[in-house]
Image: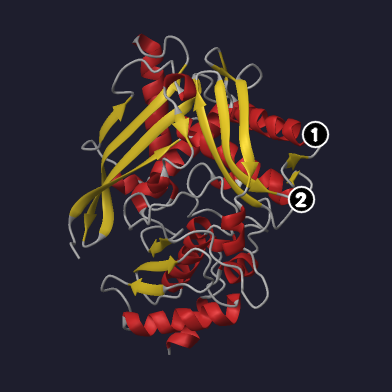
Amino acid sequence: MRGDYLFTSESVSEGHPDKVADQISDAIVDLFLAKDPEARIACETLTTTQLVVLAGEIRCKGVYENGAWAPGAKEEIEAAVRGTVKRIGYEQEGFHWNSLEFINRLHGQSAHIAQGVDASGNKDEGAGDQGIMFGYACDETPELMPATLYYSHQILHRMAADRHSGAAPFLQPDAKSQVTLRFHHGKPVAATAIVVSTQHGPGYDTGDKEAELKAYVKAVVADLLPAAWLSDDTVYHINPTGSFEIGGPDGDAGVTGRKIIVDTYGGAAPHGGGAFSGKDPTKVDRSAAYVARYLAKNVVAAGLAARCTIQLAYAIGVSAPLSLYVDTHGTGRIEDDQLEAAIAKVAHDRLGGLTPRGIRTGLGLNKPIYAGTAAYGHFGRKAEGDLFPWERTDLVEALKAAAE
């Protein structure tokens, strides 16, 4: 493993058009799971100038059954969509929660897919699709996340909070960030470049107002990043293209599932290619990636490794994973194959195994807990109540015991 290098990760704000789409899709997931914990949802969203389109497949008691919508269901869906856009803060001529056009093209789940996923007779619930999923953790931050991604998220999260509170009224919802850190002996030691592009109000691209915006961004960065990482050598690129008044879906179309690296580990770990938002937890693209993070985080929290990557693989309609792979990148206290065995044992004892049903019930995923995941990352967040259960570190002692 290289000891000295530069590494970069990016994030996008809740107002980025792709993130608007993700948040709408997960608002629909939460709406359906609140009515039916066994609901099946695959909801894709397209956003563009004054338009939101939903497409996908659902099965949900009390909402869509036997090929028909329940009375009032379509209205609830539209209200959830408009409410999400309003919460983000879009009240612009080119994208306004109240006046945008809404098209609903959701329809019933394919019976051929359902028969592979549903439990029947002696057959356990199968995976909702084939695929490979990765989980990752490292000791670069207390949240056990890559530092470049963690701070990219934090910058935009702070800016959004200031926009909502009125502390930074010149900010508009759409924004992107990027953090480049220098690593020495594998540990972050300096920020070499910070990039922030933010949508803004009229006039904040020139003169004193531009200077005010740039000073604000630098103050946010100084407040969030370790002071020792910042110096006169840190390069800032703040709105480097100039004016950024037209943003969000009016400036660029957005689609669910296009920010999978932002959602996960910022490029510091592999990705299987499957997006999260808009999917119920029978879809292993989502649930298996969550449990892989859960296991990897507990490995690092237990001190069994400084870095840990876990891969799981599934086949559609088959309950048991096809493989479990662990790589501690040369930082493990025990051999990786021994750690694989320890993880498999703990997952069996604590979750009932790494089947879709085991993951779903063990982590309590059949609940409306997803709207908050769809911006600022699915990982490295605070586990609280039913929210972000895959971020708990309650397997530490079990893993230590199994690894002995």
Q: Nearer the viewer, residue 348 or 246?
A: 348
In the picture, residue 395 is in which quadrant? Answer: bottom right
Left or right: 303 with respect to 102? Answer: left
Total numbered badges shown on the rendered structure: 2
Compared with residue 81, is residue 339 higher up or lower down, i.e. above or below?
A: below
Query: Where residue 382 sits: x, y (%)?
Result: 56, 55
Of mark 2 and mark 1, the one earlier in the sequence is 2
Q: Residue at x 58, y 60 (%)?
A: 282
Q: Answer with left or right where residue 281 lies relative to residue 215.
A: right
Q: Amino acid at mark 1?
A: Gly
Relative to residue 26, is residue 18 depicted above or below? Answer: above
Three-letter residue code for mark 2:
Lys
Query: Considering the numbered disc 1 on the image, is that residue within a helix, a strand or a loop?
Result: loop
x 61%, y 26%: residue: 103
Q: Position of residue 304 (x, y in %)?
A: 39, 77
Residue topped by disc 1: 72
**Residue placed under numbered mark 2 in the picture:** 61
Marks 2 and 1, how far apart in space?
A: 13 Å
> In the image, residue 386 lies at what x, y percent?
67, 58
Q: Residues within 10 Å of mark 2 (few under 14, many from 20)?
A: some
Q: Residue at x 38, y 11 (%)?
A: 208
